[in-house]
Image (spheres, rainbow, N blue to C red):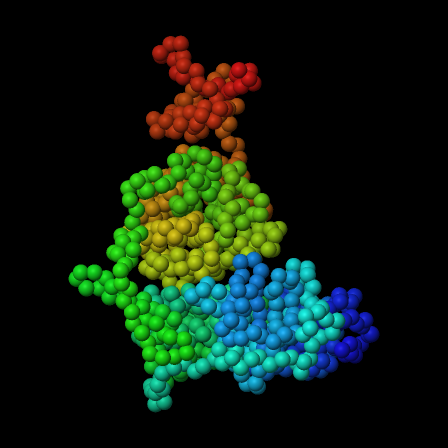
């Protein structure tokens, strides 16, 4: 099958598995697929898997005409090739790379439903991942995923005319590898398959994967459900969090949207408050996602969501609530003990069975099971501080504790946080303000305060970062949260779980919770923060201070809001200056171990970098005949008359340099003379 569509100029053709022509994958192969009987032959960007042309995929997809193909050949000859499957053809997409379980899932499925016949197979990998094509009866709609949650197996999707599309040979995978076909005989193919060449999906698989109507009696004359207002309940917040998580899969956004609008509609029927707001948030995020990838216009995306939402509300009005699950845990309490009971929904139907979980102790089942004995609590933590940002006792951010960066507008809070963020996701060891930053697995950035401005600032700092790191290790929430995080104290952790993030940056705290001057709100935020930390994650918070003079040395009392905001933090940094200052003051007003600074920071707004400027070098100062504690305090705090507190802070810094082997202390011959500190000379080191 080597026929090619006519183009304005002759295009050299190649076989669909044997490499690219100078004209590119789409120009090389679109004609072959058309002649083989495929009609949804779509162009993709060069070397990418999305987005496809708008309106030619998903539900109500248009079928390209020959003039459409011809126009794409002229406009996008170098693009990759996608196939939107026709009605009656499906693809079983197995992901078996990395920690994906698709290979085990397909083996389990064949064990249950029978061996699949050999067929045409498309892949750019050599690890068993790829898509196998089969025919099904016209009009068949299957489940979009194959998974066995009880076995921890999944990572298989069913591609069909209403769900996703294939990227096919001779396209180039983002990794640089080329897509290739393998024919029914198992060998690499130099041609493309025809829909008529494909074997049928076995009946046992059809029955297992067919979508079935939601069970339950219908109410054809039911009144329409009314979406009520009010604050979102915990159930609604959890449903919204799950819905937003579903939008992360580019190829499944329509199905995720329809499934989750139905879940939200069920909560309307059950009287949960706040579903209207949740739907508005979900709609906004869905529209933003599908317009950003170019697959829909804003008008099309809004219309698509409106159809799904209206349909979901109509459906729940006609059918009573049916709780469907593999197993649910029901907690029953009496005056003596709590019993656990499971509800089992047998495979293939049958009576629902209720079981009591016997022979389980309170410790295994209840609150006592998560308590620690005294020895474990006291001796289970390491002796020193483990730092996310810092080294040893010089720590600005300790693992398992919150860091707050405070300051007035325009002094570089977001810039400093961006420097830390760049180091957190760097592929190589990195620093911020000269201190090492431990690499995070994945960061969730809550860009709630002026997100466009934050995006510009981060572009200056991360614009040259590896795109793979930005895509895989940084997730951004844009705009206000779905719920006040001080009122729904689980939502912060649920957002982090949805993003699969181990570190959260909150920009800024005033947008996360309303009414921070109220102690009840401050305590609520601290509870949300501590819940996140208890889940094994870390958090950096940006916040504001009260209006003070730019020349005043700020202290922790200048942080805006309830005292619970700083009481629950492990470290607090205060920046001060005027908006746009090139040099701002840095004060470490709450410390995990020792106080760092005070420093003057150079704020380079063009590059988005901050660095310590004019830092006092106590070792150099001690080189001129020694340094007393009071002299060190005068240098560090820029005062001729340091108070006792400043003197003691200076003493701790000098003693720390002694412990590090960089200074030595000398006791005076006269009791009236002060102790002096001196650099360790080469001779002293040698001795």
| 515 vs 316: above or below | above
Query: Quick check: can you spot residue 21?
Result: yes
Looking at the image, the residue that sits furthest to the bottom is: 221
x%, y% of residue 497?
Answer: 43, 58
Q: How many marks?
A: 0
Quadrant where the image shows the N terminus: bottom right
| Residue at the top extreme of this rendering | 669
**Above/below status of 97 relative to 134:** above
As rendered, which of 656 and 553 lies closer to the eye? 656
* Name of the residue lying farthest toward the right: 10
Which residue occupies the foreground of this view, 333 or 589?
A: 333
Residue drawn where x is 55% and y is 15% of the image: 683
Q: Residue at 56% across / 47% down in the picture?
A: 426
Q: Is residue 433 visible?
A: no
Left or right relative to 472: residue 506: left
Q: Is residue 306 left or right of residue 137?
A: left
Residue 244 in picture, x, y percent from top left: 46, 66
- Residue 633, by quadrant, is top left
Q: Is residue 133 above or below residue 336?
A: below
Identity of the residue drawn at 32% across and 45% down: 567
From the top left corner, tell me how far across and down residue 581 is, in percent: 51, 43
Residue that appears at 60% across and 78% down: 134
Rendered location of residue 368, percent (x, y) = 27, 52
* Residue 220, quarter of the rendered image: bottom left
């Amino acid at each position: 099958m080597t026929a090619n569509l006519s183009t304005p100029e002759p295009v050299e053709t190649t076989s669909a598995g044997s490499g690219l022509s100078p004209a590119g994958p789409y120009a090389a192969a679109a004609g072959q697929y058309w002649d083989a009987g495929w009609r949804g032959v779509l162009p993709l960007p060069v070397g990418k898997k999305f987005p496809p042309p708008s309106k030619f995929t998903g539900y109500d997809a248009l079928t390209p005409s020959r003039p459409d193909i011809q126009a794409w050949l002229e406009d996008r000859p170098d693009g990759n090739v996608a196939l939107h499957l026709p009605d009656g053809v499906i693809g079983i997409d197995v992901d078996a790379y990395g920690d994906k379980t698709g290979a085990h899932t397909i083996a389990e499925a064949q064990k249950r439903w029978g061996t699949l016949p050999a067929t045409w197979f498309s892949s750019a990998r050599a690890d068993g991942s790829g898509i196998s094509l089969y025919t099904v009866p016209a009009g068949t709609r299957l489940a979009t995923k194959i998974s066995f949650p009880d076995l921890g197996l999944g990572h298989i999707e069913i591609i069909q005319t209403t769900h996703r599309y294939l990227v096919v040979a001779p396209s180039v995978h983002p990794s640089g590898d080329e897509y290739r076909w393998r024919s029914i005989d198992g060998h690499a193919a130099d041609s493309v398959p025809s829909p008529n060449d494909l074997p049928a999906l076995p009946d046992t698989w059809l029955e297992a994967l067919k979508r079935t109507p939601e069970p339950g009696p219908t109410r054809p004359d039911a009144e329409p459900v009314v979406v009520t207002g009010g604050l979102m309940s915990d159930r609604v917040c959890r449903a919204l969090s799950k819905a937003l998580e579903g939008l992360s899969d580019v190829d499944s956004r329509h199905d995720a949207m329809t499934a989750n609008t139905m879940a939200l509609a069920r909560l309307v029927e059950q009287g949960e408050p706040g579903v209207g707001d949740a739907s508005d948030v979900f709609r906004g995020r869905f529209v933003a996602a599908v317009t950003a990838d170019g697959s829909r216009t804003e008008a099309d995306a809004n219309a698509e969501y409106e159809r799904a939402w209206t349909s979901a509300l109509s459906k729940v009005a006609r059918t009573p609530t049916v709780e469907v699950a593999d197993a649910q845990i029901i907690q029953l309490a009496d005056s003596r003990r709590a019993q656990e009971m499971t509800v089992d929904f047998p495979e293939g139907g049958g009576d629902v069975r209720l079981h009591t979980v016997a022979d389980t102790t309170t410790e295994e089942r209840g609150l006592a099971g998560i308590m620690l004995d005294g020895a474990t609590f006291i001796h289970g933590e390491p002796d020193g501080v483990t730092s996310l940002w810092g080294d040893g006792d010089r720590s600005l951010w300790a693992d398992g504790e919150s860091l707050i960066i405070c300051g007035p507008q325009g002094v570089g809070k977001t810039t400093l946080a961006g420097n830390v963020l760049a180091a957190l996701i760097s592929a190589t060891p990195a620093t911020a303000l000269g201190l090492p930053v431990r690499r995070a697995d994945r960061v969730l950035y809550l860009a709630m305060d002026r997100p466009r401005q934050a995006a510009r600032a981060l572009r200056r700092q991360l614009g040259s970062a590896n795109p793979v790191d930005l895509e895989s290790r940084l997730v951004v929430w844009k705009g206000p949260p779905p719920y006040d995080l001080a009122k729904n104290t689980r939502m912060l952790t649920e957002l982090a779980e949805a993003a699969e993030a181990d570190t959260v940056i909150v920009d800024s705290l005033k947008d996360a919770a309303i009414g921070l001057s109220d102690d009840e709100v401050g305590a609520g935020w601290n509870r949300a923060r501590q819940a996140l930390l208890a889940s094994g994650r870390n958090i950096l918070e940006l916040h504001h201070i009260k209006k003070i003079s730019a020349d005043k040395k700020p202290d922790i009392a200048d942080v805006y809001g309830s005292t619970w905001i700083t009481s629950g933090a492990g470290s607090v940094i205060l920046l001060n200056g005027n908006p746009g200052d090139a040099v701002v003051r840095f004060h470490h007003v709450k410390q995990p171990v020792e106080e760092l600074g005070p420093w003057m920071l150079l704020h380079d707004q063009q590059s988005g970098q901050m660095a310590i400027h004019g830092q006092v070098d106590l070792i150099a100062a001690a080189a001129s005949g020694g340094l007393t504690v009071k002299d060190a305090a005068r240098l560090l705090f820029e005062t001729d008359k340091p108070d006792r507190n400043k003197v003691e802070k200076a003493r701790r810094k000098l003693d720390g340099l002694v412990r590090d082997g960089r200074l030595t202390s000398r006791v005076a011959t006269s009791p009236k003379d002060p102790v002096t500190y001196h650099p360790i000379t080469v001779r002293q080191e040698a001795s």
